[in-house]
Amino acid sequence: MGKTALLIGSSGLVGSHCLDYLLADEYYSHVEILVRRPLAVEHPKLIQHELNFEQLNEEVSKIKVNDVYCCLGTTIKIAGSQEAFRAVDFTYPVEIAKLCRANGADQFLLVTALGANSNSSIFYNRVKGEVEASISKLDFKSIYIFQPSLLLGKRPNRRLGEEIGQSISKWLSFVFKGPINKYKPIEAKAVAFAMIQSAKTQLQGTQIIESSQIQAIYTT
Ligand SMILES: NC(=O)c1ccc[n+]([C@@H]2O[C@H](COP(=O)([O-])OP(=O)(O)OC[C@H]3O[C@@H](n4cnc5c(N)ncnc54)[C@H](OP(=O)(O)O)[C@@H]3O)[C@@H](O)[C@H]2O)c1
């Protein structure tokens, strides 16, 4: 009997790669996803839970899995306010983590971002730091926190700022050497790959995996 996984954020850039890897990997016997709208993906291993994220308790308290993958996220622009951003990037991941831990999950894998810091004066970095801190306090056997730099990959909906950033950094990729290597943009696929590989190592405690380490896991 293989391991079981719950994935949140499966329609997103990192999450969709994560879903592909999880479904293809024999290490997992089944994969459950939480979605606002059903995904047009059919697979014998896949169970979709369509739900309102404002009422996670009812659905998530029934889910029993080994590993929880969280690739949730939004932007303040898309969410419409700092409060709405915080709900997606902090409240939902923490609520899901608590419910899954209470139901016996052993591992939690979370994507935050380079610069995550609960003491930061920058709101985005502060929320990312706060979600890391809150989840790290839960008594999972293993917690893996991935801190990617700017993500590379094709999105269904355009994000102009990110596209400009991606183009500039592709041109300047030779600059990201030595200590600033962690700022080098990274393929979303590499983040997803590193998440699945890390889950298999089952290291005890909390591991922080910076962008350059994510890249190393992907390329070695
Ligand atoms: N973009 C970057 O360059 C960058 C850099 C570093 C770190 N990160 C972080 O990396 C993580 C993954 O990023 P990504 O670019 O792969 O994310 P993404 O493509 O924007 O996907 C976000 C996921 O979160 C879900 N989501 C958003 N708002 C939601 C809501 N209100 N309720 C329920 N689900 C909601 C989306 O579902 P729907 O399809 O239902 O909207 C989607 O599955 C995020 O935490 C992000 O902050 C991003």
Image (cartoon, rainbow, N blue to C red):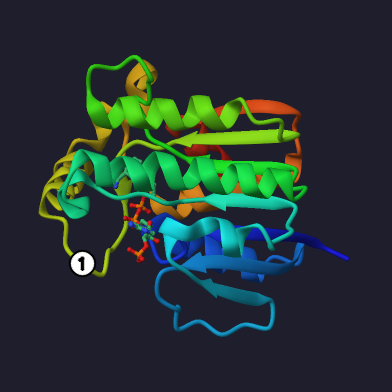
Q: Which of the pair 164/176 is nearer the observer?
A: 164
Quadrant of the snapshot with the C terminus: top right
Q: Position of residue 46 (x, y in %)?
A: 63, 76
Instruction: Say which amino acid is labelled 1.
Output: Asn
In the rendered view, does 89 fall on the left or right side of 164? Answer: right
Identity of the residue furthest to the right in this view: 1
Q: Position of residue 28 (x, y in %)?
A: 74, 63
Q: Is residue 124 visible?
A: yes
Q: Is residue 54 above or below residue 185?
A: below
Q: Which of the pair 42/131 is nearer the observer?
A: 131
Q: Which of the pair 121/202 is nearer the observer?
A: 121
Q: Position of residue 64 (x, y in %)?
A: 74, 59
Please tell me which residue is depicted at 32% across the width and 34% down the height of the picture.
184
Q: Is residue 182 above or below residue 94?
A: above
Q: SS of the residue at dot 1?
A: loop
Please tell me which residue is depicted at 18% across the width and 48% down the height of the picture.
162
The residue carrying pointer 1 sits among few (fewer than 14), some (14 to 19) or many (20 or more) residues within 10 Å by Cα, namely few
Picture quadrant of residue 119: top left
Q: Which of the pair 77/27 is nearer the observer?
A: 77
Quadrant of the snapshot with the N terminus: bottom right
In the rendered view, does 121 fall on the left or right side of 111? Answer: left
Q: Position of residue 203 (x, y in %)?
A: 75, 32
Mark 1 within 8 Å of ligand 1, using the beta carbon: no
The residue wearing badge 1 is 157
Picture mark count:
1
Q: Is residue 164 above or below residue 158?
A: above
